[in-house]
Every structure is written in C-alpha cells, then in structure tokens.
Amino acid sequence: MRLDPDRHRRRSIRLKGHDYSQPGAYFVTICTRDRACLFGEIVDGEMRLNDLATMAAACWQAIPRHFPRVVLDEGIIMPNHVHGIIVIQGRGEASAMPLHASKEPLESDASPLQRHPNGTQPGSLPAIVQNFKSISTRKMNAASGMSGTPVWQRSYYEHVIRNEDDLRRIREYILANPALLNFRR
C-alpha cells in the first residue's frame, strides 16, 4: 500500500529558524510507543517507578556525561512518558540552573548517532533526545530479553523556554504532573 505524501507527510513541530544546538533551555516530553504504561503507576498522587523506569531515569541522568554542554533541570518519569528540562550551555559558560546529574566520565555505550549524526547536528537537542532514546531502549530491551522492541514513539514534543516565568511555570507543571494525572482519571 502506497502512502499519499500530501496526507501522510510528517510535520515538524520545531520552531522555524531556531538553531537547536545553540545555548538555551528546552522542555521536552518523550512518550512511549502507543503510550503504553511501561514505567509504573501513580498511587495517591505519587509516581511509583518500576525497574524499566529506573533504567530510563538512569539514562536520563547520564545525558550530561554524553553531552558535556548539557545541564539537566527538573524532570519526571510518568507511566507512559518523560518530562524534562534540558539546558544546552555555551562553551565555558556556567549555569545558574541546578545541576542534577553527576560528573562521571563518558560511558562507552553512547549512541552512535552522537558520533555519526546522519543529518542530526551533533550536540543539538535532537541529537540529545536520539541518544537518550537509543541508549535507554537498548538497556531496557537487554534487561527484558526483548531485543529490537521499540520503547519510544517516533518523535517528541519540545518547547523553547524563553524567559524565567516560562521556566518557573514549566518546573511547576513537571513537579505537579503526577497529581494532575491522578486527578484527570
């Protein structure tokens, strides 16, 4: 069956003209494939992580080891998605935002997409998200014995954080997310 390119064209949600490799703060949401609840459940307004969620969290926290210009701000793993704030710093620039990740040496399991980007600019937000998805998928598949099983949906949501008010609102949203999800049921 052939797809009609006019009806089945993938539309970019990226901010037109924005360079996603330049310093800035980004709010990202990465959903599991088919929004499957792989990472645990919400009980009394709190997220209860399972083993897969713990692996995803470790991969998220490892992002700055693979991308030295990155600092992680608030983040949370939900049953079927991950929310987080990724800050790309300038060369030699210190951040006023808190650093939630340890400064350990680079891991040997970094995604080949970082080294051979196939069109994705190295160090950019898309390269960071590709790296996270690749490493976390391999680790989760290895742990579950399900080699080659997709974990994440094809794309992700991102929002360029433009000012301190925007950052504050997004941090509050991330921290309140488990209670919000529980309330919506």
Image (spheres, rainbow, N blue to C red):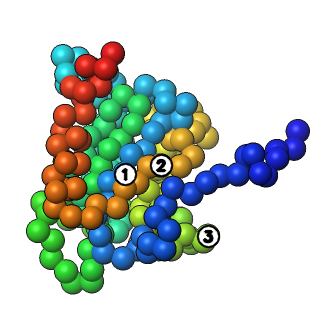
Residue 96, by quadrant, is: bottom left
Q: Is residue 83 left or right of residue 33?
A: left
- Which residue sits at x=32%, y=32%? 78
- Which residue sits at x=31%, y=37%? 77
Q: Are marks 2 and 1 in contact (CB under 8 Å)?
A: yes
Give how far apart the Cα atoms at labels 2 and 1 are: 7 Å
Q: Position of residue 48 (x, y in %)?
A: 25, 24
Q: Position of residue 137 (x, y in %)?
A: 49, 44
- Which three-letter amino acid code belongs to the residue tagged 1? Val
Whether residue 32 is situated above or below residue 135 in the rendered picture: above
Whether residue 2 is situated above or below residue 37 in the rendered picture: below
Whether residue 15 is situated above or below residue 93 in the rendered picture: above
Q: Which residue is mark 2?
A: 156
Is there any visible trace of residue 55 in the rendered image? no
Q: Which mark is residue 28?
A: 1
- Which residue sits at x=31%, y=20%? 184
Q: The N terminus appears in which quarter of the rendering?
A: top right
Q: Is residue 185 left or right of residue 136?
A: left
First in sequence: mark 2 vs mark 3: 3
- Which residue sits at x=51%, y=41%? 152
Q: Position of residue 170 (x, y in %)?
A: 23, 48
State the SS at label 1: strand
Is there any visible trace of residue 118 in the rendered image? yes
- Which three-letter amino acid code belongs to the residue tagged 3? Asn
First in sequence: mark 3 vs mark 1: 1
First in sequence: mark 2 vs mark 1: 1
Give how far apart the Cα atoms at labels 2 and 3 are: 18 Å
State the SS at label 2: loop
Whether residue 106 is situated above or below residue 169 in the rendered picture: below
